[in-house]
Amino acid sequence: YDREAGLGSYRIAGVAYGDSGTYQCLAYDQLNNTLAHSDVGSMEVMGYPEFLQGPVGVEAPLGGQALLSCSVLSNPGLEAPVQWHRGYPPLLVEDSDRITITQQDATDQDTGLPLVHSSLTIDDVQLMDLVYYECQALNDFGLNTSSGQLVLEEGGPSPFSVSIEQSSPHAVLLGEALTLQCSYPAAAGVSSVLWRAGDTGEVVSSGHTYQHNNGLTLYVPHVTPSYDGVFSCEASGSAGSAAASITVLVYEPPVFVVVPEEASILEGASVDPLPTCNATGNPPPTVSWYTPSGQPLPSVGGAPLLGAQLTRQDAGTYTCVAENAAGSASALFVLTVNGPPLVSVSPPVLEVGYGQDATFECLAVGPPEVTSVSWTQPGGEGGGALTGQHTHSLHIFSASDSNSGVYVCAAENDLGSGNSAATLSVLSLPSIVHLSQAIVVAVGTSFNLDCITGAPPSASVYWRLNSTHNITSSKPPYSLSANGSLHVSAPDIAQSGVYTCVAYTEYASTEATVSVTVGFPPTILDPPPPSLALLPGATAHLPCLVSAHPPPAIAWYHTGVVDTEPRPLPFAEGRYRLNTTGMVVGGVSRGDTGVYQCAVSNALGQDSASGYLTVGGAPLTLNITPSV
């Protein structure tokens, strides 16, 4: 009770039929005076049948009478008369020469509900009657049972014992052999032994039995459903009579008597009627349903609970499985859910490098069958429609920046249309915005090469020397920095060549080259002789052997007897020729007398050396014309 809110409640846990009736809420003060009261309300309890009495603890003598009874309270009333079953599995008991079933309908005085009394009377009780009995009652809520065993009355006659080798219940598959072996003491003086079958007590034909020492064996090579029931072995002789019983279960694998059919519906509808899957067998098979993915599906009365508004995801092949102890059987139910095409594009997001190809796949399915497929690029050229793209695959060759964007696949069938979109990102071609100029350095002089990249910022850099040697990490004499610069320490001539900066992403790359020359200044190893004398007409060989890298430029100069400044030699005239070791002057004359200078130079320095050539012979005659 909540005093502030003025609310009270009365809770009954686990209501029973006895809780049916009227209820009223009363409010009292401290002097127990009634302050207020509610209207009178009533509660009616409905549910499964409730047993007030069951067939428990019933005893009977052999040859006497047994009375089993049960009383059932039910709201709503029972759908059918109370039924009796006995043995395992429970077999329906009906009226016969020895069995009588009666039922009386009444009203329960406490609850006013329908009350049913049912009795089962057995005359001339035999050993085969000493089994479990079950009283079954059914109403709209379901089935309820009450059971008990009929036992031999204490103090009754005790005949010698008869035993059956097989335990009860004894199961055998339909069509297989049944063997039941009955034995009794040799001292019992048995003169007659037989097998009885079923509730009727019919004697089993001698064609199915054979005698052995102190017993009788029942053998059936191929059992049929008729052998399902209680069998008893009875022996009699001078010491009296005795019997033993056994319940035989003839197991039959499930066999479908009702199998599901195919169904085709519109999306959002339900399957009506529901597919039904019923099977026979012994013991009665249980029926289970499974979804197309193999998950258990709840079912009622052999029909799966598929739902009220089915979608395309509910379509597929459902499996009905009937199982019992003898085996299993299965049947298939194919559900088709029709609607507009279901469309999906893969991959939903795609990145490619500049110049690479891109492909999207469009999966469009019915039912009914898809009649057309088209692609568009919203916001693209020409209104977005992609000319000629009417297949499930969209191919974009050598993608560029203009190909980036959203692509939509649309599909149609007789019930409508559907679409799905995917995004393409074309990564820009890496760019190199700054590269060092060509350089010439001396051997042992360290140098740096800069390579600065632009978009995309994710581009990486490595270097390549002379198209053969990739420089991807720092290893002497190379040191590669994170910003793409290359440092070469104490280089040798082997580090000369064309350096290529490669800016790359996962999808594309850009290259730029710079020339690097590592060398040393020229040195004249074999200079012209300080003095060389030749006769006119001879050939002069003036050496000038040079060591240099890069190869130097070589120039020769001549300062004649009457010259005041050295002049370059005119190699174009043909009398002067260069060779790998110096210079040759052919057919010298006295005018060739003078100083010869060899000058060499490259980007790293220069050197020179001189020698004197004298061309001798008859004295020179100088014609001097006096001036007047």
Image (cartoon, rainbow, N blue to C red):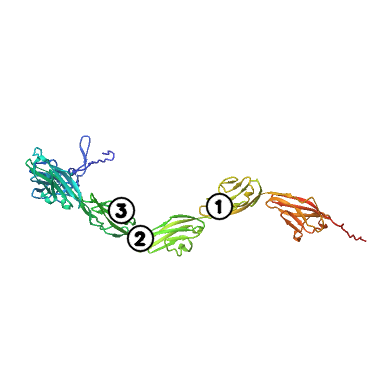
Q: Quadrant of the C terminus?
A: bottom right
Q: Which of 369 and 512 is in front in this view?
A: 512
Question: What is the number of the mark on residue 503?
Answer: 1
Q: Nearer the viewer, residue 510 or 314?
A: 510
- Residue labelled with disc 3: 291
User: Percent position (x, y) of residue 149?
Assistant: 14, 42
Q: Nearer the viewer, residue 494 or 392?
A: 494
Q: What residue type is labelled 3?
A: Thr
Of the two numbered discs 1 and 2 on the same chain, state the one appearing first in sequence: 2
User: Percent position (x, y) of residue 406?
Assistant: 45, 57
**Relative to 347, is 169 on the left or the right?**
left
User: Percent position (x, y) of residue 400?
Assistant: 51, 58
Q: Can residue 307 be seen in this view?
A: no
Q: Which of marks 2 and 3 is in front?
A: 3
Q: In which quarter of the image is the N terminus?
A: top left
User: Percent position (x, y) of residue 46?
Assistant: 19, 47
Q: Is mark 3 on a helix, strand or loop?
A: loop
**Relative to 305, is 393 on the left or the right?**
right
Of the two numbered discs 2 and 3 on the same chain, state the one appearing first in sequence: 3
Q: Which amino acid does label 2 sit on?
A: Gly
Q: Taking 313 as reference, is 16 above or below it? A: above
Question: Which residue appears farthest toward the right when viewing the image?
Answer: 628
Tell me whether circle 2 and circle 3 mark residues in contact (CB < 8 Å).
Answer: no
10 Å crowding of disc 1: few (<14), some (14-19), many (20+): many
Question: What is the number of the mark on residue 366?
Answer: 2
Q: What residue type is labelled 1?
A: Ala
